[in-house]
Amino acid sequence: MPGSVQSIERAAAIIRLLSQSSRPLGVVQIANSLGLAKGTAHGLLKTLQKVGFVNQDATTGKYNSLLDTQGVATGHVDPHELRARSINYADSLASRTGEAVRVGVLNEQSPREVLVRTVHHVFRPDRSSQTLEIGTDAEVHACALGKALLAYNAGAAIITATGPLARRTACTIIDAPELARSLADIRAKGWAADFEELSIGQAGIAAPIRLAGGLVVGAIGISGELDRITSRSGQHATVAPKKALVAEVLQTAGHIVAEFGEPA
Amino acid sequence: MSGRYVAAIDQGTTSTRCILFDRQGRLVSIAQREHRQSFPRPGWVEHDGLEIWHNTIQVVDSAVRKASADYRQISALGVTNQRETTIMWDRGSGLPVAPAITWQDTRTNATAQELRTSPFAQRVHQLTGLQPEGYYASLRLRWLLDHIPGLQAKADRGEVLAGTMDSWLIWNLTGGATGAETRHVTDVTNASRTLLMDIDTCQWHPELLSGLDLPLSILPEIRPSLDNYGHTSDVLPGTPIGAVLGDQQAALFGQHCFQSGQAKCTLGSGSFLLMNTGVQPIRSQSGLISTVGYQIRGQDPVYAHEGSIAVTGSLVQWLRDGLGLIKTPAEIETLAMTVPDNGGCYLVPAFAGLFAPHWQSEARGVVVGLTGFINKGHIARAALEATAWQIREVIDAMTADTGIVPTQLRVDGGMTANNLLMQILADALGIEVTRAMVPETVALGAAYAAGLTTGLWADRAALPSNTHPAGRWTPHQDPTYRETQHRQWRRAVQRALDWNET
């Protein structure tokens, strides 16, 4: 058989060793246990840390496997963990844009339906009365937050496409091929938007939170009045999200991704 | 002032952070490093001063890099710290003579007890506004002088300096052992926690020093919170240090509690409820303490009423590190959500005795109401409820002292990221809870204070308004159910009292 990739074999061995161990291990212990040069083990551990498979304790320097706890093999990140790592930057995004911010994940509770669940919600920073929407679900195809998640999850996209797409407003995308084109466009640009697709007069911009290696663990977005989120340009007065707001959302997503690279 | 950013160093109980804010008070970057919690004996909690100083250097560098900034763009530096934690160091070498004794450490409880029952106690309370508790810095200094061989002699020769963590950081930031402009200072909010400061004059009082036989030479100079603390030497070279504030007072400042009656609660390792009481300190009858809220250079100090709870977030860390029930702090919410309620169990985390309002150093932690039905989800739930009930007790005591019934509580701090906890809190208090837009209100307060001193903001009216809430929780619970649960909690607290025998 063709040679298997030695780095992956060694990485798997490191993961198994850490998972078996009752306490975190240092690089020398790991290297000795697996017969690796210390430098080799160190390089593997740093990459495993970057992709979120292992964690290095900031004070002891020892490593532990994250695979059994955060379900990283399945791609699932604990929503509260996601909120903890997002909160500072999400708050800052709300403050900088003056709009409400949401962090969302796909909620695949039902095998036939996919929703977007809000795991963090920051109020729009004004004097208006708002209700906290943490824990609520919305149609994944009808808002920027949902579409940003759908674009990077083929399985969820298939489920959504085969079911009926509920119409929330006259602008909601209810045609499966049109949705597929919209998702491809999101992947090309790296961000999603919705214009009055969830509710009239409202718009949203969202970006995926994409860890090293490409796995999307959630999305972050702003939403608010159409006239504040978008501007009209060109001959045909096409509605498009304000570039500065898109940049803010993308930058915030980048900061959150960087937080996942830090020790817990 | 043309600088774009203000930097705050938040030297906390479990970690040291550096946070950069812009002129609009928005968080630009944050860097954090945890330090070791050392428990050499039951009831002892220590930190390594050098480890903390090295972490400080690293997080400042990291925060500036993450902001893609240059150190010259930092117009001011503010320092805020975990209060009461005490450290002594050799003036010549710059090395600590012992690990820092933290505010959670209980080794001086016996001395505090002796002091409380002595004729001197009343004079102490009259001068400082505090009842002697092991909690306060001066008793820890006395302990170090009594137990480290040769230290008393060195102190008498003037070779040793002492202080709370703000003094240690400022000393190192301004040049340390080798610097020509090194400052040995502290601010009034930190000094008001030592049992050595006259709360009316804001100066060290000779009677208090001689009562504990402490030499004046080891103590830092007391300055107003917002003042010129010198310039940094190697870290962000030449940056003016414009403010020093104890962390809870910094949060009060960061939450814009500038008027008498305004209050905030910071939920961190411990939780602290502070209310601005204006230009007069209020002597508490209900187990709370009078402290200095802040002082602006050239003005009278502003006082605050404080209720401190020793163990809230620390409990979550203990469930992670001591019991291995969770792998990360955020998981406590996931675990607690696996059950609908506490299943009848209650957890009183009196790990270091009980602070406000009970102040019983003999109390220790208990879990009551266990049956075979209880699983780790219930324990997690009980752990979160413990935070809420302890805050309820402090609010009730504050109302008894001041006559003010809060209709809303402003919260900040790391634990406000826990959505379930916030709802539990609103339910336990029976009032609306709102979360500040920036959870890092402690650092923001230090940044505001430093920026005001150096002129980045002209006056308090010019400070960016952060009073818009980021989130709001309203009580859902049936009031009868709430009071039943509250009664059960109070019964559980009774079980925690009078455990430790010295």
Image (cartoon, rainbow, N blue to C red):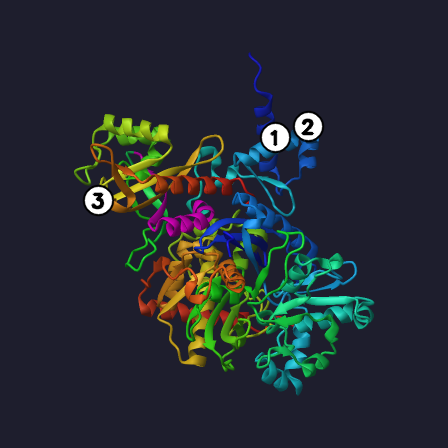
Chain letter, disc 1 residue: A
Amino acid on which the number 1 mark rests in the picture: Leu
Q: Do badges 3 and 1 share one subunit?
A: yes
Q: CA distance from mark 1 to mark 2?
A: 10 Å
Marked residue chain, label 2: A
Which is more N-terminal, label 2 or label 1?
A: 2
The image shows residue A32, relative to residue B158, as above or below, that is: above
Binning the other alpha carbons within 10 Å of mark 1 as few (below 14), some (14 to 19) or many (20 upward) gives: some
Mark 2 against mark 3, which lies toward the viewer? 3
Write the residue at 57% across / 20% down.
A5
Q: Position of residue B226 (x, y in %)?
A: 55, 67
Q: Is residue B58 left or right of residue B417?
A: right
- Where disc 2 sits, the SS reads loop
Q: Could you tell me which quadrant the N terminus of chain A lies in?
A: top right
- The span picked out in magenta is A82-111
Residue assigned mark 1: A44
Residue annotated with mark 2: A36
Which corner quadrant holds the C terminus of chain A?
A: top right
SS at badge 1? helix
Q: Nearer the viewer, residue A235 or B272?
A: A235
